[in-house]
Image: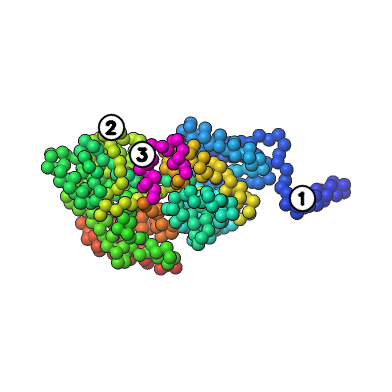
Amino acid sequence: MKKFMSLISMLLLGGVLFGAGQQDAVPVDVDPVASATEAGTPGAPVQLRALIGSWNTMASSVESRKEYYEQAILAWAEEHPDVYVEIEGIPGGQTAQAMTKLITAAIAGNPHDFANIDSQWVGNFHEAGVLSPIDDYLTQEDKDQFFDFTKIVTVRDGKQYNLWAETGLLLYYYNTDYVKVAPRTWDDVFALNDTLKAEGIDKDAFLTQGKGAAAAFCLLPSYWAQGAVLFDAADNYRPVFGEGKNRDAMINSFSFIKELVDAGAMPSEMIGYDHNELEAEAKADNVASFIAGSWKQGGLDPEKWEYTSLPSMDGSKSNIYGGWTFGFLARDKKKLEESVNFVNAVYTSRDAMADRLPRHGYIPVRKDVFSAEAFKSPFYEVIYKELEVGRARPATSMYPEVESLIEEAMGKILSGSDVAETVDEMYSKVVRSYNAKN
């Protein structure tokens, strides 16, 4: 009976404490931990669950990255001794599986409190209604530092739901042994091909990518440079790339690829190329110029290879941005606040980005990070300008279908299918899918 009364007393006391807005006490003499699976003080009253790309945790095989995450997590833990984070890693190459599992659990009412979300998947989470707004935990000054392209994805209906952590973009690389002036327009690319042939230089004048997601990633900047859009964000992300000037721009973009192949400027085998294959072609001295990710710059001989903006139909600048965000799924306000605090401290604050991103070779998405010493170079001067002219992949669950259809259309067109008919077929498929969903 005494034990029962003692238990009742403890419960009543606990009720008083919680009623007064207090948390349980932080465990005494428990040191904070930092590992691939844990962050913070074990047994702390605020318990968080996170899903994070393994490459962005202490599971990384790169020592300098592991060192950063350990130091950053322990520094955060000192400031937040009442918080503990259980970390589940996303294995490399398993993005789709991880995102599907994450959104399914959230819909079922068992979400992680925060998670790495691939930027092209954010639309799925918006549409499912499982993200929580985080405006209450961000300053306007912080919000203003993020490049505008991030907000198209992270903000919905005037509220911010995600923090973009890092990005990558495309550059046009050219070998100065063969290219004296970098092409700005498509006509310039064909002129380069004519010059190489006239001089007896047996190199591919230009290479782009047609394999997997890279096919759409490399095609879309030329499409956007013509003032076209894939979806109407003001009309529930209705697909519009088969209408009016958008249709014309898509036909033009595919036709450019076909005409390059027909002119012998690029082999039809480009449909099997991604970023790695193009880097290999460059190192083998088989190509005069190509489009690939900004992360490939460090693997090329700087004595031979220069980089600049992508050539476009009329010289207008455009680009495309990938990368990962952090999305917040917690409903409890305290957990939501501490989730944002953790992500800011380790990943998305100005200081975190300035220290972390050079270790990965990632591109910052905050303007103020470019004033850090690690980002004061001619390369990052170019990158900063490129971050102001492009777009992120649209934040709609329909985008992955468009991405797959662009790759499929590329193969059909290079095999002889009519460009306009292939674009119309693509559009019909996406419209049917959209109507079925809506």
Mark 2 crowdedness (10 Å alpha carbons): few <14, some 14-19, many ≥20: few
Q: Is residue 83 left or right of residue 271?
A: right
Q: Position of residue 332 (x, y in %)?
A: 63, 54
Q: Which residue is mark 2?
A: 303
Q: Earlier in the sequence, mark 2 or mark 1?
A: 1
- Rounded to the nearest whole Å, what is the CA distance between mark 3 and mark 2? 14 Å
Numbered label attached to residue 177: none
- Image quarter (top left, top right, bottom left or bottom right) of the C terminus: bottom left
| Residue bounds of the magenta highlight | 368-388
Mark 3 crowdedness (10 Å alpha carbons): few <14, some 14-19, many ≥20: some
Quarter residue 395 falls in: bottom left
Coloring scheme of the render? rainbow
Q: Is residue 412 left or right of residue 342?
A: left
Rendered residue at 17%/50% (across/down): 263
Q: Is residue 175 left or right of residue 57?
A: left
**Secondary structure beneath label 1:** helix
**Secondary structure beneath label 2:** loop
In this view, 182 is above or below 250: above
Residue closer to the observer: 305 or 258: 305
Mark 1 crowdedness (10 Å alpha carbons): few <14, some 14-19, many ≥20: few
Rendered residue at 35%/60% (across/down): 229
Rendered residue at 38%/37% (across/down): 377
Q: Main secondary structure of the magenta part?
A: helix
Q: Earlier in the sequence, mark 3 or mark 2?
A: 2
Numbered label attached to residue 17: 1
Q: Earlier in the sequence, mark 1 or mark 3?
A: 1
Looking at numbered disc 3 in the image, what kind of residue is underneath it?
Phe
Q: Position of residue 163 (x, y in %)?
A: 51, 50
Q: Which residue is mark 3?
A: 379
Question: Does the CB distance between marks 2 and 1 fall below 8 Å?
Answer: no
Q: Position of residue 352 (x, y in %)?
A: 51, 40
Which tag is nearer the camera, tag 2 or tag 1? Answer: 2
